Image: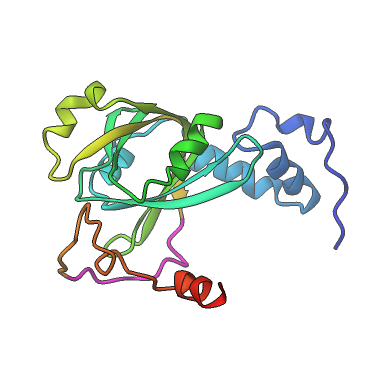
Amino acid sequence: MSLPELTETTSPDRVELPGSRGEHFLQCALETSDRATRFYSDQVLDHLNPVMAAFVGRMEMAFISTADADGACDSSLRAGPAGFLRVVDSRTLVYPEYRGNGVMASLGNIMENPHVGMLMVDFAEDLIGLHVNGGARIAALEEFAEFAADEDRKVERWVVVSVEEAYIHCRKHIPRMVPVDRIREWGTDDVRRKGGDFFEVKARKTASA
């Protein structure tokens, strides 16, 4: 099926709804507008309600999506003990940046383009996810020094997310996973403990040199 072209005047009756112009366009083109409107009305907030805030507080990881000024995308994983994601208030979420590989892909994108998308998923108990989209900024360690005092790992800086959208990710395709105890080598530079050359990139580059 070919779709009509997206134009600046597409779906003018839906501009007050959450979401992008592109999704509104496709809702009209593919006749899903009624379903989408119900979802916006029933499930999408511009803040974190108390149930969402509690969910964030018990998450041990979050998937982070960013893009640079040209729209080139990157996705990454942030992880830590439950509570490493901090809800400051209903419209503000903070997470720490620990020592990493030095590339700074996510932070570099945020410097160019402050839009960020977060997805947190409970794979073990409730089998549900939470999307949080908003604007992000990089904050110095000192700005949230009281949070750093509770951290077992060395925090280098913070990312502050201003919540613009918060909504459910339904459970029907979320696999159930069982957590197991493991030793986490937080902050290590040991190549083997970090996974080494698992995908054989270095080995193949060396072999072809």
Residue at the extreme front: 209
Q: Does 116 appear in magenta?
A: no
Residue 57 versus residue 198 in the image, above or below: above
- Look at the image and tell me in which quarter the N terminus lies: bottom right
Residue 92 appears in the rendering: yes
Residue closest to the eye, 171 or 205: 205
Question: Residue 144: image x %, image y %?
Answer: 23, 25
Residue 119 falls left or right of residue 150: right
Residue closest to the eye, 191 or 136: 191
Residue 41 falls left or right of residue 57: right
- Look at the image and tell me in which quarter the C terminus lies: bottom right
Q: Which contiguous range is marked in magenta?
A: 170-180
Q: Who's the residue at 26% across and 36% down the image?
A: 156
Q: Does 176 appear in magenta?
A: yes
Main secondary structure found in the magenta portion:
loop
Q: Who's the residue at 49% across and 73% down the image?
A: 206
Question: Residue 39: image x %, image y %?
Answer: 56, 45
Question: Residue 165: image x %, image y %?
Answer: 49, 35
Q: Who's the residue at 54% across and 38% down the image?
A: 41
Quadrant of the rendered image containing residue 183: bottom left
Residue 26 falls left or right of residue 120: right
